[in-house]
Amino acid sequence: MKLVPTFRFSLALAMMLVVTAAAISALFVKIYEHIPTTNQPYLKVDAPVLFLLSIVLTAIGLGALKGHNAVQMMLQITVACLSYVSLIGLAETGRERPLLYWFQIGFGLLVTIPLVARQSVKTRIERGPRRKFWKNTCEAIFFAFLTMMLVLLGLLLQFLAAYAVPSLAQLK
């Protein structure tokens, strides 16, 4: 068993890298525009970087857990970033009704459809590398939704630790 697997660089990997970089850049700019520069100007850059870093690290961790390849992990990062860009875009334009249904639409597109497709792949394609690829790709799309929810949970916990807990200590 090899300790370090061989890495094959392909055109598909290069294209996915470009798409992932574009999605990350778009989300960085969207977040950057909405961070106020009041008494903590360093947050203007730090907040988007930390948010994107949490998305990337969560996607890599979930992908490594299931043995996904680099392209599938980048697909997961891209879908998560584009989902957040769509959420911020809906909020910016003031579209309240689609904003209310964003979570349900995201759940349907990123959880229900890929899991049904995964089950279809498992039953219709015989065992082999093709089946494993499609099964892992469906899982990667599902993991994009899981990544989004884990990042939001982490942000909530970080917010509570940074703002709610110190304000409770001042009440005493």
Image (cartoon, rainbow, N blue to C red):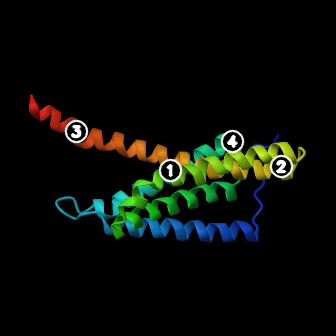
Would residue 170 be found to the left or right of residue 148 on screen? Answer: left
The local crowd at label 4, few if under 14, some if 14 to 19, many if 20 or more residues have their Cα within 10 Å, is few
Q: Residues within 10 Å of mark 1 (few under 14, many from 20)?
A: few
The percent coordinates of residue 161 (x first, y second) are 28, 38
**Helix, strand or loop at disc 1?**
helix
Amino acid at dot 3: Ala
* Front position in the image: 107 or 27: 107
Give the amino acid type for the residue marked by disc 2 in the picture. Arg
Q: Earlier in the sequence, mark 3 or mark 1?
A: 1
SS of the residue under disc 2: helix
> Most extreme residue toward the top, as rendered?
172
Closer to the camera in the image, 156 or 39: 156
Taking the spot 40% from the left edge, 65% from the top edge, the residue there is 90
Mark positioned earlier in the residue sequence (2 or 4)? 4
**Pointer 1 residue:** 104
Task: State the residue position of label 2.
Answer: 131
Residue contact at pointers 2 and 4, CB within 8 angstroms: no
Q: Which mark is residue 164?
A: 3
Q: Are marks 1 and 2 in contact (CB under 8 Å)?
A: no
Q: Amino acid at mark 1?
A: Gln
Residue 54's place in the image compared with 14, above or below, is above
How far apart are the alpha carbons under marks 2 and 3?
48 Å
Q: Which residue is mark 4?
A: 66
Q: CA distance from mark 3 to mark 1?
A: 29 Å
Q: Earlier in the sequence, mark 1 or mark 4?
A: 4
Q: Residue at x 30, y 44 (%)?
A: 159
Q: Residue at x 53, y 48 (%)?
A: 147
As measured in the structure, the alpha-carbon distance from the residue carrying label 2 to the one carrying label 4 is 15 Å
Q: Is residue 118 visible?
A: yes
Task: State the residue in front, 68 or 113.
Answer: 113
Question: Of the residues tagged 2 and 4, which is closer to the observer?
Answer: 2
